[in-house]
Amino acid sequence: MSETLGGPIVRDKLWFFAGGEWGNFNAYWPDQVPGPDPKDDTSALYDGKITGQLGHKHRFNLTYNDHERLEPDGGSVWDEPTTWTEFSVDTQSYALDYSGILGQNTILEARNGELESHEDERAQTPTDEPHFIDYTVSPVETFGSPYWPWLWDSHMDTAEIKVTQHAHDFLKGDHEFRFGIQYNRMGELGEPTGITYSYKYDYYNVLYGTDYYWYEYNYRFVATPHFYGGESETLSAFVSDTWRINSDVTLELGVRYDKSKGWIKDLPRLDDDNNPTGEIIQGRDQVEWNSFDPRLGFAWNIGGTGENVLRGSLGRFHAGLIAGDYNYPPPQMPAYWYEWQNPETEEWEFSHGFFEAEDISLRPGVENTQTWEYTLGFEHQLTATSVIGISAAYKQTTNMMGWYIADDGEFNWETIIDDVTGEEIQLKDYLPLAQPTRLKGNSTGPGALGGDRPYEQDYLGVFLTYRKRFSDNWDLFASYSWSESTGLNPTFNSGGGLGEQGAVFWDSTTMSNPNIFYGATSDRVLGGDRTHVLRLAGNVVLPYQFKLNSVVNIQSGRIYDRRQNYRLPNTTGYIVTKPAADRLPTQYLWDFGVGKHFYFGKDLDFSIFLQILNILNDDAITGWQTLAPRGGGDLIPDAWVLPRRANIRLRFAF
C-alpha cells in the first residue's frame, strides 16, 4: 500500500511531495515451513521532497528518505527453528541539490548528501546453544543458534560542485567545458555476534598419500567476538571538454585526479560475551593512493548525413576506494582456530588456525586496481526509425588486490591422487604453528603453489545491435554479443566454482590457502564467463489497444571448474583439478505478455496484464550440489531455470 501527497507551498516558487509505502510479503519454497512465530517480510518506506525556484535561474531540491525492512528467514524442515534468522535494515538519507544559471553561458551545480544505515542479522528465536552442523546426513541438518549473526553500521557523506561553461567559436570550434571537485567520506563498523560453532563431518574415500580412508569427526571453530570496519576519504577533481570541431566531428577530452586515503579507526576490545573490556585497540593507516586518469573519445559523422557514425574512446580508470578490501582482519584481531574431538578421549584437540592474525594486513606498496579501456563502434541508419551497429570493447585490468602469500613458514610436500585422471599432485602441508605470512597485495606471492603471479584480467567483447524505435505500432531491440574474460583474479576459486569476478574481500579467507592456487594461470578463462548472448525484445500495439510484448534470451551457460577436496596431516582444503572444465547448458528463454488499458472517465482507469514466463519450459541446469564429488563421481545438479509460469497484474487508478 502506498500514499502520496504533493502540491505548492508558495505558488510558482515552492513545492512539496511526501510519500509512504508499506508492504507485507509471505512466500515459502516447498522444503520450507513457517517459523514458530510466523512473520511476513515487512517494509515501511517514507520519502519527502521540497523543490524551490529562486527566480528564473536558480532551483534547489531537498529530499529525505527513511526506509525500514524486516526479512525473516522462512526456515527449513532440515534446520532447527532456533537457527532461523531475520534480517533488518534501517536507512536514513538526505540530499540537497542546487543548480543555477550564471550569465548566458555558465551553469553552476552543487550537491551535498548523507546516508546512515544499520543492519542486523539475528535469531528469530534466541538461544544460548552454539550452532551445530551435521554433515553426516543428507540433506545437512543444523541446530542451536544461527550460523553467523552480525551487526553492521555504515555511513556516507558526499559533496560535489560542478561548473559548465559553454564557449562558441572558441579555439577552432564550440566547446562545453566542465570543471568539478568531489568529496566522499565513507565508513562502516561490523561485529559478528556469535562466531563459535561446531560441526560433524564424515569423510569417504579420502586420500592420505595413496591410500583411501573413511572416518567421522566432530570439529569446532573457536574465536573471540571483535569489531571490524574501515574508513575512507577521497578528494577528486576533474576537467573535461566536449569539443565540436565542426558539424561532423566531436572530441571528448578529460582528465580526473583522485586523492584517496583509507584507515581503520580505534576499536574497543570485546570479551567472549560481546561486552567491551574497556581496552581500546589502536587503529592504523591502510592505503593512501593518488591517481591521474586521462580519457579521450570521438564521434565522426561520416559523410555529414547522419546515417553513418563512427565512435571510439580510450581511457584509464582506477577503482573506487572499497573499505571491504582492507578492513579485515582488524588490528590485534583475536586468534581463531579449528579443533577436532578425539573419539577416544572426547576431548577437543587443536587442528589448525591462525595465531598471528594481527600481522595480516596490506603488503607495503600495494597499488590501487586500474583498468585501461578501449572501445570502437560503428552505427548505420537503415531507415528513419531503425539503426544497426557493431562495436567492440577491450579492458585490461591490473593491480587487482588479492591474497599475497610469503615464502616463509614451514611445510612438508605431500602427494594426493587426482580422482579423475589418477595423476599425482604435490601439495604443501604447512605445520600448524609455522604458517606463512598472509598479506593483501597485487600478486599471489612466492608462497602460493606455482609461485608468484600478478592478479590481472583481460576482457574482450564484440556486440551487434539493431534498434527500431516505436513507430507504426511496434518497436524492436536485438543484440548479439561474444565475449571472453581471462586472467587470474583474486576470487577465481570462490563463488561455488562458478567464479566471482570483481568480488570484494569482506572477511573472506577462502583464497588464502597456498594450495588453492594449484593450476592457476594468468591466461585461464574466468569462471562465470558467457561466450554467446542473443537477446530480442519488442512491443506491438494491436487494434483496440491490445498491447503485446515479448523477450527472447538465448545465452551460453557459465563456465565452471572441477574441484577436489583433500586432507593432509595438517591441512585441509580443495583445489581446482580441471580449470574451465565445462559450461552449464545453454539457456533458451522466451517470455510473452499481453495487456489492455481501460478508461472509465477522467477519474478512473483500469489495466490488466497477463505474462507467461519461460514459454518453452526450458530446464537448463544453473548450479551443482558440489564441484568436488566424492571419488571423482558425476556432478549432481541442484538448481535449474525456473519452470514455465504465469502472472496476472491488475491496476486501478482513481
Image: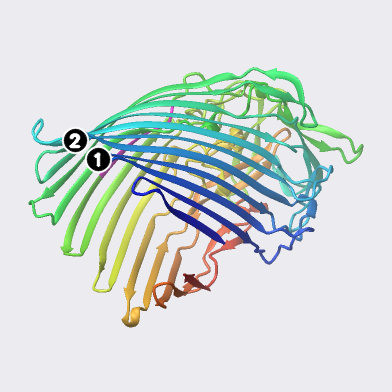
Pick the front one: 365 or 609 = 609
- Identify residue type, mark 1: Ser
Q: Are marks 2 and 1 in contact (CB under 8 Å)?
A: no
- Magenta-tinted stretch: 368-375
Find disc 2 in the rendering and name its residue: 105
Find disc 1 in the rendering and name its residue: 313
Q: Quadrant of the N terminus?
A: bottom right
Q: Quadrant of residue 373?
A: top left
Q: Badge 1: few (under 14), some or many (20 or more) residues near its Cα, within 10 Å?
A: some
Residue at the bottom extreme of this rendering: 544
| Main SS, magenta residues | strand
- At mark 1, the secondary structure is strand
Q: Quadrant of residue 131?
A: top right
Q: Position of residue 416 (x, y in %)?
A: 65, 41
Please give the name of the residue rendered at 74% of the width and 55% of the height, measured from the top-left corner. 140
Q: Is residue 159 visible?
A: yes
- Identify residue type, mark 2: Asn
Check if residue 402 falls in the magenta segment.
no
Pick the front one: 171 or 286 = 171
Q: Position of residue 630 (x, y in %)?
A: 68, 53
- At mark 2, the secondary structure is loop
